[in-house]
Amino acid sequence: MAEADIAADIAYVATAGAAGLALAVSAWAARLHRGLRRREAEVEATASQAQIQSAACAGALNAFDDLRLALSPDGRVQAVYGPQDALFQLSDHEGLAGAASAKEANAAAQGLIERLQAIHPARMTALLQEGEGFETLMETGEGAWAVEGRALGGGAWVRLSRMAAGLGVEASPGLLADQFPSPTWVVDGAGKLVWANAAWLHETRAESLEQAREQGVTFDRGADALVSEALRLNAHQEGFRWISSDGRRRAWKILAEPLVGGRGAVIAFALDMTEAEETRDTLRRHVEAHDETLNHLADAVAIFGPAKRLAFHNTAFQQLFNIDAAWLDERPTHGELLDRLRQRRLLPEVVDYAGWKSNELEFYGASKAAPDDTWRLPDGRTLRVVRQPHPLGGILLIFSDITDELNLRSRYNAQIQVQMATLDKLSDAVAVFGSDSRLRLCNEAFERFWNLSHEALHQADFDAIANLCRPLLPEQAVWMGLKARVADPDPESRVPITGEGRMQDGRVVVWRTRPLPDGATLVAFSDETARRALEQALAEKEAALAESQALKREFVGSVSYELRTPLTTIVGYSELLEAMGDLPERSRQHAGAIRVAASHLARSIDDVLDMAQIDAGEMELVLGDVRLQDALTDVAEGLRAKVEGRGATLSIDIPDDLLPVRADEKRITQAVEHLLENATRAVSEGGAVELKVERGEAEVRIRVSDTGRGIPYHLQAHVFDRFVRRERGGPGVALALVKALVELHGGWAEVQSSPGSGATFILHLPTEARSDAAPPELILT
């Protein structure tokens, strides 16, 4: 019973719940139905309003003469608004506008877009792909159309509007623009010329606008670039160009301005700035020349403007005060400059600096130049300061360092006094005559020389003085010649002269004239009596000396020849003793020493004879083509044993391709042999001797080097002197003979040595001997 009641309750609850749910669903469905009907009514009203608004927009778009084309991102026409006759006119599409279908209208619109893409490919691409708007023009047979492109909502719109007659670029801008004296022209959005005035046609030598269009005439490439930049940026551009016209370069200022409402058109003006630029260039050159001139002045120049700021300074100003150039370029005020100079002690030291500075700055109100001032600086310099008003306002300051001038003036006055005292102490009689022939000054010796009084010479002219001197020197030609040098202003007559004569009292007088820079003439008389007597005595002594030299050479020659005979006997008997088999070894060594000493003495005698022959000018060279490779190698090899006997090495460096030289082979080998023997005596154990030949431009350099003890610096200048004690080789004439033999060939000898580092003797031998010692050679042609 209980279970049946529970089931009945459950069934009751389920029924009640289902009924309640059905009632709720019904209520919700009724409410939803009412909402849907209300929403449907609102949607229908909105759609109706949209249709009305769309129709109104389409009507508004079609009510005007311009065309509007809606484009997809790929450039396809999606909608066309505007008159169809204009659409077919612009697209050149066949068919009548009135009977055209929507398909034909879309085809015509697509053709118009393709035409625009062909005319303005870059702008159309930028519009469709990058959303960049543009404005330009499109010309047709019946007028110009303004073209505008705008991006919107992922697509694009293109608007084409017919240019009004009053604003069209093909129409004349009017008489005023055509008569404008400056060249003016208009280009469309494609950069093509659409209009130009008469001045433009004149400058470009075009007969008409049509001819200019057909031939692509332009004003200038630079101006075209400026117009293109104005088209690209749709902004004002200006530039400057020099253009050659009528054989003359002219300056033009180019102005490019986008036309307001011109839809991409640009109007350009060319303003003739030649006269202004030439004037500006002339002024610039004048200013630069003025500044350059001031910079080359030795005086320091500083210009301060009306605002008391430094406007200009030359290089001398910066150098005079040693001020930082960068600080001067900042244009300091006059007061700041004075403060900087005072800090560096470059102003006169005064007790009241503030008052002194105030007085300096008061010159700006002056109307005329102030008197020159002098600044004495603490560093010892003296400056002359010039202040004068500047024509453009401000003041001009000139600083001159007169320290040297004052010192020079002081030294000049002192020098004049010294010269006067010096002239009075001279033994020569000196007189100075002005260009008016009057005596300006004379020394005491002049009065004593001619036995004249000071009163007789005072204010006297040349003729009066000549009359007073004629009793001692009566030759009229002498005084006429002197007067020509004194009184004649002709430059050919004002030349120095010298003469000599004998006076009535037996003295020998020499006169000299010298023109002075100020037009005066100096005349000097000197007593040469004692000098002439001394010259005669010297001439006699010279003759005696020449005779003694000849006797000396004869004596040397005689003695040398007399010595050779016993030496030959000594050498012969010493060689005989060395060849004896039963002679003891020690005696044989003694005989060898006698032979070597005798040979060396004979060699020295030969050198003395050669020097004597050279001194007498009697040695003649036997010139021939000498192969130095063979001649010098034989000499060096002959001394190799002697070099190696001292424990040293001998090296020979002579190029195989060395060309023959024109020289005396005997004398050249003699000189080189002496140098090699000298080097052999200088080297010691472990040393080296080198013979080297080098080819120069017009000479052959023969070097003989050794690693011996070298030559002291104080002896190197005398190493080629004869009979002088030397560190190398002892007293003798060997090195002097070497130098003399080379000089006979027209060459010269030198020595290079550092004490302790050996020595190098260099013979500079010309490839063609230039010597008077060689007899003239026969030249066959």
Image (cartoon, helix red, strand yellow):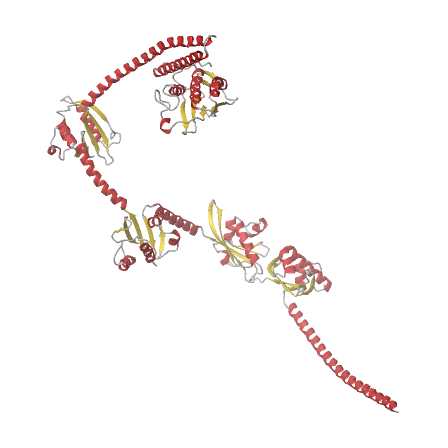
In the image, farthest residue toward the bottom: 1
Q: Is residue 108 visible?
A: yes
- How many circles with numbers are drawn on the protein? 0
Taking 768 as reference, is 173 above or below it? below
Q: Residue at x 23, y 19 (%)?
A: 538
Q: Report the side of 364 relative to 480 (left or right).
A: right
Q: Residue at x 64, y 55 (%)?
A: 121
- In which image quadrant can residue 47 be found? bottom right
The percent position of residue 238, horizontal first and vertical second, equals 50, 55
- Give the camera-side residue of 80 and 169: 80
- In which image quadrant can residue 510 be found? top left
The percent position of residue 135, horizontal first and vertical second, equals 59, 60
The percent position of residue 487, horizontal first and vertical second, equals 20, 32
- Give the camera-side residue of 334 and 470: 334
Taking 359 as reference, is 491 above or below it? above
Q: Residue at x 12, y 28 (%)?
A: 451
Q: Quadrant of the N terminus?
A: bottom right
- Give the camera-side residue of 507 and 638: 638
- In which image quadrant can residue 127 be found? bottom right
